Amino acid sequence: MLSMIIMEVCAVLLLVLGLFLKKGKGLMLLAGYNTMSKEERDLIDKRELSKAAGNLMFRAALALALLGLTIYFKLSWGTIILMVILIADPIILSVRMSAKMPKTTSRGGIIVALVFTAVTFIFVGGLLFYGEKEPVVKISDNQIRIAGMYGLSVDFSDISSISLIEKSVADLGAGRRTNGYGGFSESLKGHFDSPDLGKVLLFVKSGASPTLWIERESQEDIYLSFKDGEKTKSLYQELKGVVPVK
């Protein structure tokens, strides 16, 4: 809910900014334009620039508003599509507007802003993709390897018990995130502090059940679940067959 509220508030702010830009106000807020000399700015069609920038803010406001809804309703593909739109739209507009500028106009500021925006959105998009990806669990002769965000290796000697709980982590109570990831599609990864479970390490889809519980001797207990409950059950059976629990 908090993510949706933040997105909707940002959408409203972008809508207001778009209205100002459409009226020819606030052009100095635009990267590239604000670094030009007065002579260079005089060569630009400010009316066209205001219209283009204002329309960009309107489209971004709509995309952010929809993004808040896709995050809230856990529509992963919708979220990815909207992220692509938010990345591509300003880049396309910057290239188009830069091509229309007089050759005497400095384009360095626009290029820097373009690169910075692209890198920022690519980083955020990559982080979301990596965080939402389900962990890959590999079992060797003497340890379990959980690959992915906050992944680790767990020696068999550190495992005291393995259980399958017929509840989701949402039912058990994930608690407060202390050093972890909480994504838009029920993905919880990393370190959490739960009033009921204590300090735990999660690799779960919070609404998915059952949940695999790996109790450890010296570190936080691990809770793991996949979106497909049958996959979680299969992993449990595989671990029960190879891990010599105490």
Image (cartoon, rainbow, N blue to C red):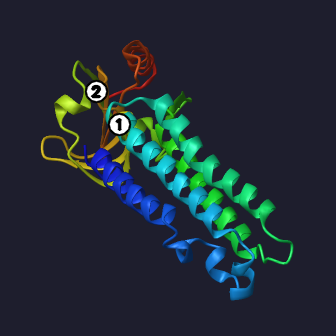
| Front-lying residue, 14 or 133 | 14
Mark pair 2, 1: CA separation: 18 Å
The image quadrant that residue 231 belongs to is: top left
Left or right of 241 on screen, residue 28 = right
Q: Residue at x 76, y 63 (%)?
A: 98
- Residue 48 in the image, given as x and y percentages of width and height: 64, 61
Farthest right residue in view: 103
Farthest left residue in view: 195
Residue 163 is tagged as none
Q: Residue at x 22, y 32 (%)?
A: 170
The residue wearing badge 2 is 207
* Quadrant of the snapshot with the N terminus: top left
Q: Secondary structure at mark 2?
A: loop
Q: Residue at x 50, y 61 (%)?
A: 22
Q: Secondary structure at mark 1?
A: helix
Left or right of 49 on screen, residue 3 = left
Closer to viewer: mark 2 or mark 1 = 1
* Nearest to N terminus: mark 2 or mark 1: 1
The residue wearing badge 1 is 69
Left or right of 201 on screen, residue 133 = right
Give, as a three-letter code, the residue at label 2: Gly
- Residue 150 in the image, given as x and y percentages of width and height: 46, 47
Q: Are marks 2 and 1 in contact (CB under 8 Å)?
A: no
What is the crowding at mark 2: few (fewer than 14 residues within 10 Å), some, or many (at least 20)?
some
- Residue 108 in the image, given as x and y percentages of width and height: 76, 75
Residue 26 versus residue 54 in the image, above or below: below
- Residue 122 in the image, given as x and y percentages of width and height: 61, 52
| Front-lying residue, 175 or 75 | 75
Give, as a three-letter code, the residue at label 1: Leu
Say whether residue 200 is visible. Answer: yes
Left or right of 153 on screen, residue 220 = left
